[in-house]
């Protein structure tokens, strides 16, 4: 009889070994290309936190001097998402830059309609990176689509000499340089890197809250080697993003069987074939979460995912589906934990699914909070104030 | 739901040479060598594919067709299936390191570049989004939240549309007080974006799939480019 050593799954700890990574470390090639004069690498500023990626490599996450590459879907339709990211930066007194010399990555359209091409997509990306570099800040990408796309652009630029030549020429015409960031950093990685500092400043207890997490496809499936993993979170068998943040805030994260499924966004589908988005989102995500976990909240980290998972529930309700779970971003939850105003900062009135039961469970007086926001809007309507300021938001 | 007709005669009216030319264009893409390494027919991609659950669609069929260089089938797929894909890249977990999703990205690009009627049909109703992204640099904007555009998103869209101006002003970041774009964008930034569209052949591409849209875009861009001192935006 052969005796095999038995290691119980619970005793086994997986630590990825970067020397055994099946994929190249693109950063080494970037620095090599820089030496050859092909491009310039934008370095992560000095104040950074180290996190580990899928294959155990270290990724530097800048704490400040960040240039906020905003998301058109967030700013346009769920603006409390980005407002919460800025609010967190302000609470920690960090030096950040909110640019007006920024376009969207235009990748939503590219994935939806293919009415573009790799040169145009790379040029849009590098124009934005150059704009960040010119003012001395480092790009922090708010959108999951932009993050995924920029990882692809960086990969293509490293591997395709002809593409580099074309983009360099376009940049010359714009009076800019071909600059590529050392790391492509998503804001949710910044939130994760800051989780202990956020938890230190937590003023709202969330230990009685159960959440389900949806990791964004373009975050962890596209150029997977750039996503953050942690042996303490799911045994490093899936990305630690969002879950690591929520656990630091004391939130119970429930697991569900369709965690790997996409949200149903589909890029073109959410705009012109929403029957698909609605059905997938409700049947493969929300209903499964409800049946298997029955969470108080769904937390995710991308524009399209918050939008699809939240907005699709309205039609689901009409069909008597098991829906009714509010959806927020990790930035909103982190800000809320630190005492941000649910309407002035999180701007939850732009979301669809009823989030009042969740806020009430946290001990918040929803009616009072809404009337505080409404009072600000009334002042604007009466022409007594032009805008609500950051100071007003913290009153 | 109509079943996908994979019969090789479906597009018999199109010559084999033409189908082959289009496939050669797919293969000439610089990404081609990173997206296809053969196919085990294991179906792992299908298991994680959202579109395969709701449409008669399969990333495995896509990978198989291109791996076998089945030119007739590829043409059929290029006129049908590719527009069902969600571009989620769940299929990137393929054990052969294929990316059916990226194969589809390339096929879509070729379909659009060659002005295939099916690509035009797929983009019908989508023109206003292309206009928005190309003219403003934002894919979506606050003023798009109108009840008639999103009837299935419920009554809160009415509330947003009614209060749009004031709710935008009630956003603390100064860049977000806009309604026509997601945030305040500099003139110079938009000009640079227009130059990129012109220099990379995207304008010609739009002309090929939607001439009306192209004319409107040219109109909008020309004036602003001229004002900024650009009257020649060709690029070799
Ligand atoms: S493309 Fe990959 S995952 Fe899909 S059937 Fe072929 S080998 Fe399997
Ligand atoms: S990218 Fe397309 S083919 Fe691949 S899993 Fe997603 S929907 Fe399916």
Image (cartoon, rainbow, N blue to C red):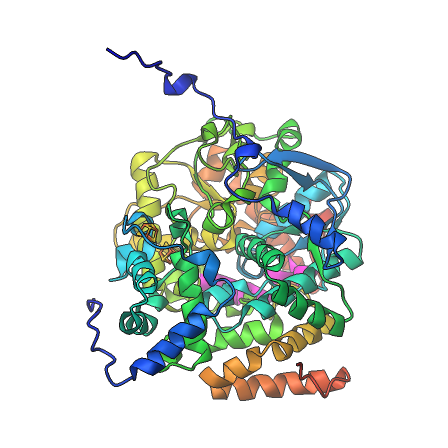
Q: Where the N terminus of chain B falls, by quadrant?
A: bottom left
Residue A198 in the image: x percent, y percent? 64, 33
Considering only vertical position in the picture, is B77 above or below B89?
below
**Lateral position of residue A383 relative to residue B113, left or right:** right
Residue A358 in the image: x percent, y percent? 46, 38
Considering only vertical position in the picture, is A243 above or below A5?
below
Residue drawn 41% across the image and 57% down it: B36
Considering only vertical position in the picture, is A348 above or below B196?
above
Kindly report the secondary structure that dominates the magenta region of the rendered protein. helix
Is residue A166 a member of the stretch shown in magenta?
no
The magenta segment: B157-177
**Lateral position of residue A178 relative to residue A149, left or right:** right
Confirm whether residue B3 shows in the render.
yes
Residue B180 in the image: x percent, y percent? 60, 71
Q: Where the C terminus of chain B falls, by quadrant?
A: bottom right
Residue B43 in the image: x percent, y percent? 28, 50
**Lateral position of residue A264 relative to residue A363, left or right:** left
Front-lying residue, A171 or A317: A171
Residue drawn 69% across the image and 87% down it: B223
Q: Quadrant of residue A377?
A: bottom right
Front-lying residue, B99 or B83: B99
Residue found at the far right of this picture: A135
Confirm whether residue A385 shows in the render.
no
């Amino acid at each position: 009889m052969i005796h095999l050593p038995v290691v119980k799954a619970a005793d086994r700890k997986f630590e990825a070994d970067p020397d055994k990574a099946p994929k190249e470390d693109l950063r080494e090639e970037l620095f090599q290309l820089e030496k050859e004069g092909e491009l310039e690498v934008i370095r992560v500023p000095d104040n950074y936190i180290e996190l580990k990626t899928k294959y155990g490599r270290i990724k530097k996450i800048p704490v400040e001097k960040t240039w906020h590459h905003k998301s058109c879907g967030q700013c346009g339709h769920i603006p409390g998402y980005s407002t919460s990211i800025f609010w967190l930066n302000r609470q920690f007194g960090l030096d950040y830059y909110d640019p007006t010399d920024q376009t969207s990555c235009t990748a939503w359209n590219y994935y939806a309609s293919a009415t573009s091409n790799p040169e145009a997509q790379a040029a849009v990306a590098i124009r934005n990176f150059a704009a960040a570099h010119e003012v001395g800040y480092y790009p922090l990408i708010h959108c999951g689509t932009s993050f995924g796309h920029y990882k692809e652009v960086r990969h293509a630029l490293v591997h395709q000499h002809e593409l580099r030549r074309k983009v360099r020429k376009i940049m010359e015409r714009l009076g800019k340089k071909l600059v590529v960031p050392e790391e492509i950093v998503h804001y949710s990685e910044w939130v994760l890197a800051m989780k202990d500092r956020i938890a230190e400043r937590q003023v709202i207890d969330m230990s009685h809250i159960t959440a389900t997490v949806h990791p964004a496809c373009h975050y962890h499936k596209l150029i997977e080697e750039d996503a953050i993993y942690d042996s303490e979170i799911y045994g490093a068998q899936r990305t630690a993003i969002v879950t690591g943040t929520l656990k630091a805030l004391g939130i119970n994260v429930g697991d569900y069987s369709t965690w790997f499924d996409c949200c149903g966004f589909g890029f073109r589908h959410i705009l012109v074939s929403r029957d698909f988005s609605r059905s997938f989102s409700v049947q493969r995500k929300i209903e499964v979460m409800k049946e298997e976990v029955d969470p108080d909240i769904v937390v995710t980290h991308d524009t399209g995912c918050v939008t699809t998972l939240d907005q699709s529930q309205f039609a689901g309700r009409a069909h008597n589906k098991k829906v009714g779970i509010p959806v927020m971003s990790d930035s909103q939850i982190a800000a809320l934990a630190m005492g941000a105003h649910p309407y002035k900062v999180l701007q939850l009135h732009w979301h669809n699914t009823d989030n009042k039961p969740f806020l009430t469970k946290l001990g918040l007086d929803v009616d009072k909070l809404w009337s505080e926001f409404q009072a600000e809007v009334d002042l604007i309507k009466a022409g007594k104030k032009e805008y609500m300021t950051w100071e007003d938001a913290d009153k | 739901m109509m079943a996908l007709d994979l019969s090789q005669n479906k597009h018999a009216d199109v010559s084999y040479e033409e189908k082959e030319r289009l496939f050669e264009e797919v293969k000439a893409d610089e990404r081609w060598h990173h997206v296809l390494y053969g196919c085990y027919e294991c179906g792992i991609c299908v298991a994680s594919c959202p579109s395969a659950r709701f449409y008669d669609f399969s990333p495995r069929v896509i990978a198989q067709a291109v791996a076998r260089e089945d030119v007739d089938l590829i043409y059929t797929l290029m006129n049908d299936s590719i527009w069902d894909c969600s571009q989620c890249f769940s299929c990137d977990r393929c054990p052969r390191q294929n990316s059916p999703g990226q194969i589809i990205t390339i096929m879509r690009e070729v379909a659009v570049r060659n002005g295939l009627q099916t690509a035009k049909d797929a983009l019908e109703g989508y023109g206003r989004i292309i206009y928005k992204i190309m003219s403003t640099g934002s894919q979506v904007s606050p003023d798009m939240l109108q009840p008639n555009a999103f009837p299935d998103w419920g009554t809160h869209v009415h509330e947003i549309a009614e209060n749009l101006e004031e709710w935008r002003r009630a956003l603390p970041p100064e860049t977000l007080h806009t309604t026509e774009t997601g945030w305040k964008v500099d003139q110079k930034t938009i000009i640079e974006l227009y130059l990129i569209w012109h220099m990379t052949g995207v304008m010609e591409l739009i002309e090929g799939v939607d001439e009306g849209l192209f004319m409107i875009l040219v109109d909008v861009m020309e004036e602003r480019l001229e004002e900024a001192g650009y009257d020649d935006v060709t690029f070799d």
